[in-house]
Amino acid sequence: MTNIVSKLKGLSALACGLALLASCGGGKRPDAVNPGQSSTATGLEYNEDGGFAVNDFRGQPAGPNLVFIQGGRTTLGSYEEDILNTRDNLERTVTVASFYMDETEVANIHWLEYLFYVKLDSSREFYESALPDTTVWARELAFNDPYVEHYLRYPGFRYHPVVGVTWVQANDYCKWRTRVVNQKLAEDNGLDDVPETSGGRIPLETGVVLPDYRLPTEAEWEYAAQALIGTQWLDENQTHKRLYPWDGHALRNPYGKQMGYFLANFKRGRGDYAGIAGKLNDGAMITAYIYEFPPNDFGLYNMAGNVNEWVQDVYRPLSFREFDDLNPVRRDGWLDEESNYDQENSMVNDRARVYKGGSWKDIAYWLSPGTRRYLEEDSATATIGFRCAMISAGTNY
């Protein structure tokens, strides 16, 4: 009897093992990368003459300059004292899906490359509309003439962030970049004829495709700036929050050879943009090199300071009240129409766009990821630039 029970237990264990192997796929169940030779629904062979084509797929191609940002739950909102009494970014918990973001701000050299190709294949009118406003540097009571003339085009400023660009211009750049990068992907994968037959876009089914470059949503930008992936401990425990894109409430590096050096490019106080000669506090009286300061835990540079950055969202002071808690974004005046605001004395309308991050001309208060400001989408300043983002396609996290 004992022998029979033992055998039954052995068979049961074997059955459980086989079931577990089957449930894990055992290397045989189809998936996106390995779909198999035939359909599990019809049994028909893939890629036969005249049959359904299933192209090779190895995941989303790597886009130039992009860093993967793993999504998750976070608390959006400002941890700073609301010194302006705006109450426009109260704390709320959301989940942001994984996405990609430029590791740096878009630089002058990138914009000059854009202008070069636009001049070749676009109308004169569009080329002129793409020119940054270099007069944003001009001030009646300041000698900023060298920046007006030299900042965009002089080689020494090549890898400083482009400024003087509007929200509209930044979106145009994203569209151009999408087309150019996908054209190169097509050429690299032997699909040279695709751009002519599909308006420059590779069909999604080929798997040789990048989603659109675009401006990040405000939620994505704030999540990426927080970089709380660096505060994880054991299973979904966060050891602390962050006031800035780095640990602690101080603005100087507390570690190693860089101890005492500032972690961002900002205005330290009234009339103090860079400190005293011989020991400049952040080394930049205006913008800085786009790789100048240590990256945050996602590998992103200058998510605080240097230049503010445009994001997708239309500004509303009460966006935190009406929002989706998965991938929130405000595209327009839905549930909070611009007619609710005094249009003669308020800039709150459907053309007001949010910008984030603080700049070389801002005090430390604006370096906190939760702070937010807004400007008309067709306006430009010497303190606002941008970086691009992109969805992580084909993933559920």
Image (tube, rainbow, N blue to C red):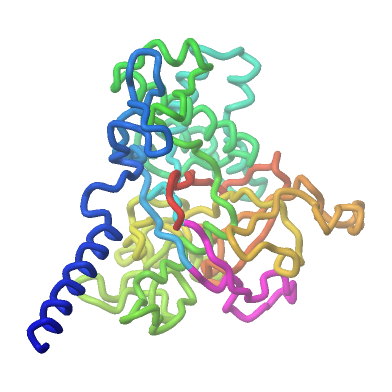
Q: What is the magenta segment's predominant secondary structure? A: loop
List x then y, in percent, for residue 383: 56, 51
Quarter of the C terminus within the rendering: bottom left
**Dividing the picture into quarters, in which one does residue 372 lie?**
bottom right
Residue 126: give x, y in percent of width and height.
62, 20
What's the magenta region? 73-97
Q: In this view, does 202 lie above or below 86?
A: above
Rendered location of residue 108, percent (x, y): 44, 36
- Left or right, 118 with respect to 229, comes to right
Which residue corresponds to the image point at 64% horizontal and 42% vertical from the top-left?
Answer: 380
- Judging depth in this view, the residue of 33 and 216 nearest the camera is 33
Q: Is residue 297 left or right of residue 151?
A: left
Query: Is residue 267 left or right of 55 when viewed as pictured?
Result: right
Can residue 77 be seen in this snapshot?
yes
The number of callouts visible is 0
Residue positioned 59% across, 36% down in the render: 171
The part of the image, by quadrant, that contains residue 17 is bottom left
Please tell me whether residue 317 is drawn above or below residue 393 in the rendered image.
below
Estimate the x, y position of residue 382 in percent, counting from the top left: 57, 46
- Magenta span has 303? no
Residue 394, relative to residue 267: is it above or below? Answer: above
Residue 82 in magenta stretch: yes
